[in-house]
DNA sequence: TTAGTAATTAGACAAGTGTCTAATTAAATG
DNA sequence: CATTTAATTAGACACTTGTCTAATTACTAA
């Protein structure tokens, strides 16, 4: 989880995840969308992968990256918990219950 | 949003938010829960405040900090979007709809 | 005013991070 | 094999970050 939060702290990496939202892409596909060298992009991929936010598979000369939503879900769960029951300011209402 | 993600990247700060989950606390209350000097804690408060993740108010000699959930909601919205419609792997199912 | 308490601000410093260029690995192709 | 293409790894470097001690501000109370 800590690695995930650290990985998400960089806007380039969040953008990469956004691009992977609608399907896997190659390292080259992703790299050409940013004003940054390929090695820099490669570094971001490795940070995302180490945080388990993406998966990768090689196909010939290319490497395909895909979003791994399981860790994103953990982050969301953490955020939901933060806004949960005990805090009166939360938007999440408990269902019914008398009085 | 970027400031929020950066703020959330540190585990001490996430813990602080967790403590504020069930109500506001003074700087001192919070500080004594961590093995860290008060100035260091003060620094974390300022980062959280700058990211709008907490609010503060002075009452006499003490400063009370409280969780501000609005930015947490933005983060959650971002995460939800990442797992949204276009990604076949998402857990979020669209309701009904023919075929 | 002086003393005491709560908290922050200032400044220093080691460790971590994001970026680059150069070199390297891995695979396809002549 | 030698070349080309896709991508990573290695190493350097400036900038940022988390922590500390020392000093300062803000408030309370005698």
Image (tube, coloured by chain):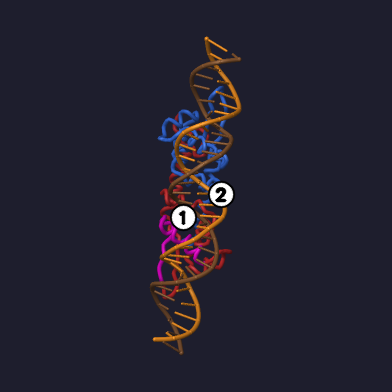
Chain colours: A blue, B red, C orange, D brown
Q: Disc 2 and disc 1: Cα gap in Å?
A: 29 Å
Mark 2 residue element: helix
Are dots 2 and 1 on a single chain? yes
Q: Is residue B55 magenta?
A: yes
**Label at residue B81:** none
**Label at residue A2:** 2
Number of callouts in the render?
Answer: 2
Q: Is residue A54 magenta?
A: no
Nearer the observer, B13 or C1: C1
Label located before the other in sequence (2 or 1): 2
**Relative to B98, residue A97 above or below:** below
Mark 1 residue element: loop
Q: Which residues are magenta?
A: B38-58
Residue A93 drawn at (x, y percent)? 46, 55
Nearer the observer, A39 or A80: A39
Nearer the observer, B37 or A82: B37
- The residue beneath circle 1 is A93
Residue B11 drawn at (x, y percent)? 54, 54
């Amino acid at each position: 989880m800590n690695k995930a939060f650290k990985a998400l702290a960089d806007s380039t990496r969040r953008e990469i995840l956004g691009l992977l939202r609608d399907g896997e892409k190659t390292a080259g596909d992703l790299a050409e969308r940013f004003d940054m060298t390929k090695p820099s992009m490669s570094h971001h991929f490795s940070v995302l992968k180490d945080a388990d936010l993406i998966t990768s598979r090689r196909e010939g000369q290319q490497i395909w990256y895909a979003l791994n939503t399981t860790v994103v879900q953990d982050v969301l769960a953490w955020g939901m918990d933060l806004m949960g029951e005990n805090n009166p300011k939360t938007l999440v209402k408990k269902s019914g219950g008398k009085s």
